[in-house]
Amino acid sequence: MFFRSWASLGQVVLASAIVFAIVVAMLRFAGQRALAKMSGFDIVFTVTLGSVVATGAISRDVPVVNAIAALITFLVLQEVIRFFQSRSLGIHHAVREQPDVLLWDGHLLEDRLRETNISADEVRAAVRKAGLRSLSEARAVVLENDGDWSVIAKRDGPSDESAFYGLPIPGHPEASRGDDDARAVPTSPRRLP
């Protein structure tokens, strides 16, 4: 079981090299975005890609051409989905999890902490890492769809707060989270208090 034949070993080496070269070319085509921090969608794509690569490189039952066809199909699907989600927030939020606002205007949003199974200590840690000493110094703490924390400090003076566009902000009609439609983003950015 440790060694079948030189021909079999050569087939694995050749198939692995071909599939590796195709994956490198695909990542070059997909660009830096494919290598950035990953959302759930990106992780599923990466795991699927890895499975196809492993199967194509090792399995004698799957011709290398079939593995390449599968890789190209997944890349095309990812690019088509990326195209549509860049043009439609509805599709974007269907594919990628919407960020969660867990603290607003210095106050923890207990209902959202329970919904997301995030502890208040995790929010406090994010605030500390941002260099703030108190929750009251933060305008918002957002758990982004790639798992990173965004902590926005309060600022003196007027601000349009356009970075919050599309987020469920407490006290606004779009912010109610009782059903899927309630999480919809407004059709145009508006000034928040």
Image (cartoon, grey):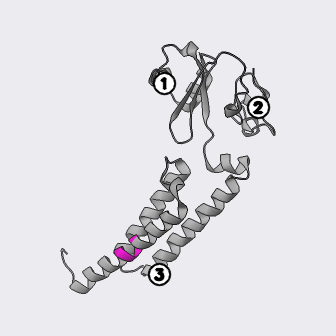
**Which of pointers 1 and 3 lies earlier in the amino acid sequence?**
3
Q: Which amino acid does label 1 sit on?
A: Ala
Look at the picture and state if 185 lies above or below 18.
Answer: above
Answer above or below: position of 176 versus 47: above
Task: Calculate the distance from the C-alpha at mark 2 to the C-alpha at mark 3.
Answer: 49 Å
Q: Is residue 170 visible?
A: yes
Q: Which residue lies furthest to the left in this view?
A: 2
Whether 185 is drawn above or below 60: the answer is above
Q: Which of marks 2 and 1 is in front?
A: 1
In primary-sequence order, the first of circles 2 and 3 is 3
Q: How crowded is mark 1: few (under 14 residues within 10 Å), some or many (20 or more)?
A: some
Amino acid type assigned to the residue bearing label 3 in the image? Val
Image quadrant occupied by the C terminus: top right
The amino acid sitting under disc 2 is: Glu
Q: Position of residue 14 (x, y in %)?
A: 33, 80
Label 2 – label 1 distance at C-alpha: 28 Å
Residue 94 percent location from the top left of the image = 66, 49
Residue furthest front as drawn:
157
Which quarter of the picture shows residue 112?
A: top right
Q: What residue is pinned by disc 2?
A: 174
Q: Which residue is drawn at 47% across and 63% down?
A: 49
* Residue 59 visible in the snapshot: no
Packing grade of label 3 (10 A; few <14, some 14-19, many >=20) is few
174 in relation to 13, above or below: above
| Mark found first going from the N terminus, 2 or 1 | 1
Picture residue at 49% right of the left edge, 46% below the top: 37
The picture quadrant where one finds residue 56 is: bottom left
Q: Circle 3 sits on which residue?
A: 65
In the image, farthest residue toward the right: 187
Provide the residue span drawn in magenta: 16-20
